[in-house]
C-alpha cells in the first residue's frame, strides 16, 4: 500500500518537474533505483547516474552564470563565488525540499535524517532523466534555468560561509532600526544547542553542535522569514545584479 502511494507521489512529482509522464515500467524502475539510493545501498547504476547528474547541473548552472554576467567586472573570482553558492549540497537540498521530493525520501526512509540524502537525490534524478528517458538535454537545461530563476535568491542565503548573525544585525539596524536578541541553551538529551532569535514580535529557532552554529542557524531562519529582497540588496548592489 505504501509503495503504491509512493509511486503515485513520484509520478506526480516528476511530471510537475520534467513534464513527462512515465509509463508503469519506467516508473517502477525509477522508483527502485531511488529507493536504493535513499537507503544508502551500494548501487553502481545509481552512482553512475549521480555523477552524470552532478556534471549536468554543474554545466547548466555555470553556463547560466557565464551568460548572465558577461561584463568585464564579472571576473573568474565572481563566477567561481556565485557558482559555489548555486552548485552545493545546501542549494540542492533546498531545491529538493521546494520541489516536494523530500516527502518521498521520508516515506521510504521514515525517521531518518534526510539532510545528507537530498543533494545526491537531485543529481540522480537529473542523471536518470538525461540518460534513461526521452527528455532532451535542452529541455532539461531549461528546467534547471527555471529553478535557478525561481529560487536563486533564496539559495544565496544558504551559502555556508555567510555570517548570518552579522548580516542580519547590520541590515535590521539599517532598515528596521532594531537589533535581534539571542538566547541559547544546551540540551541535556542530545548535547546539542538550541537558540532563539527574537526580533520585535518575531521568534525563530536554530540548533547546532555548538553555540555559534546554533545562533547562526537561528539568524538564517530569521532572514528567510523576513522579506528576502530587502536583505539581498547589498549583495546584488555590489555587482549591479538585476
Image (cartoon, rainbow, N blue to C red):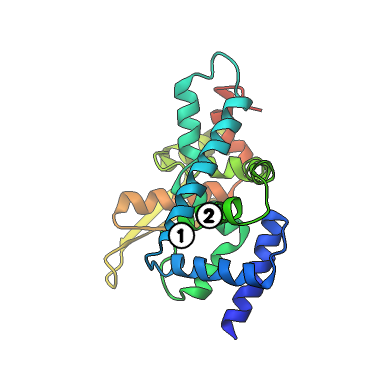
Position of 217 with respect to 188 (left or right) is right
Q: What's the residue at 42%, 70% (across, down)? A: 39
Mark 1 or mark 2: whose residue is earlier in sequence? 1
Where residue 46 is drawn, which disc sits there?
1
Q: Which residue in the rendered view is the most extreme toward the top? A: 72
Q: Which residue in the rendered view is the most extreme toward the bottom? A: 1
Residue 93: x percent and y percent? 50, 54
Q: Which residue is mark 2?
A: 122
Residue 216 seen from this side? yes
Task: Give SS at disc 1.
Answer: helix
Q: What's the residue at 66%, 44% (across, down)? A: 150
Residue 201 seen from this side? no
Indicate the quadrant where residue 41 lies.
Answer: bottom left
Residue 213: x percent and y percent? 34, 51
Q: Are marks 1 and 2 in contact (CB under 8 Å)?
A: no
Q: What's the residue at 60%, 86% (across, down)? A: 1
Where residue 156 is drawn, which disc sits there?
none
Amino acid at each position: 500500500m505504501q509503495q503504491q502511494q509512493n509511486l503515485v507521489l513520484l509520478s506526480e512529482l516528476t511530471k510537475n518537474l520534467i513534464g513527462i509522464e512515465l509509463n508503469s515500467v519506467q516508473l517502477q524502475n525509477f522508483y527502485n533505483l531511488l529507493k536504493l539510493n535513499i537507503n544508502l545501498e551500494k548501487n553502481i547504476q545509481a552512482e553512475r547516474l549521480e555523477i552524470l547528474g552532478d556534471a549536468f547541473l554543474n554545466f547548466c548552472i555555470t553556463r547560466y552564470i557565464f551568460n548572465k554576467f558577461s561584463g568585464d567586472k564579472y571576473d573568474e573570482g565572481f563566477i567561481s563565488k556565485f557558482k559555489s553558492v548555486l552548485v552545493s549540497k545546501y542549494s540542492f537540498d533546498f531545491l529538493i525540499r521546494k520541489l516536494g521530493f523530500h516527502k518521498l525520501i521520508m516515506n521510504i526512509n521514515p525517521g531518518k535524517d534526510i539532510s545528507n540524502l537530498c543533494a545526491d537525490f537531485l543529481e540522480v534524478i537529473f542523471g536518470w532523466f538525461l540518460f534513461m528517458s526521452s527528455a532532451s538535454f535542452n529541455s532539461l537545461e531549461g528546467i534547471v534555468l527555471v529553478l535557478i530563476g525561481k529560487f536563486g535568491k533564496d539559495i544565496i542565503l544558504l551559502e555556508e560561509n555567510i555570517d548570518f548573525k552579522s548580516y542580519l544585525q547590520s541590515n535590521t539596524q539599517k532598515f528596521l532600526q532594531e537589533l535581534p536578541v539571542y538566547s541559547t541553551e544546551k540540551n541535556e538529551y542530545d548535547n546539542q544547542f538550541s537558540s532563539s532569535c527574537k526580533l520585535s514580535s518575531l521568534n525563530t529557532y536554530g540548533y547546532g553542535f555548538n553555540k555559534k552554529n546554533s545562533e547562526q542557524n537561528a539568524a538564517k531562519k530569521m532572514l528567510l522569514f523576513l522579506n528576502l529582497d530587502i536583505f539581498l540588496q547589498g549583495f546584488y548592489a555590489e555587482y549591479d545584479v538585476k
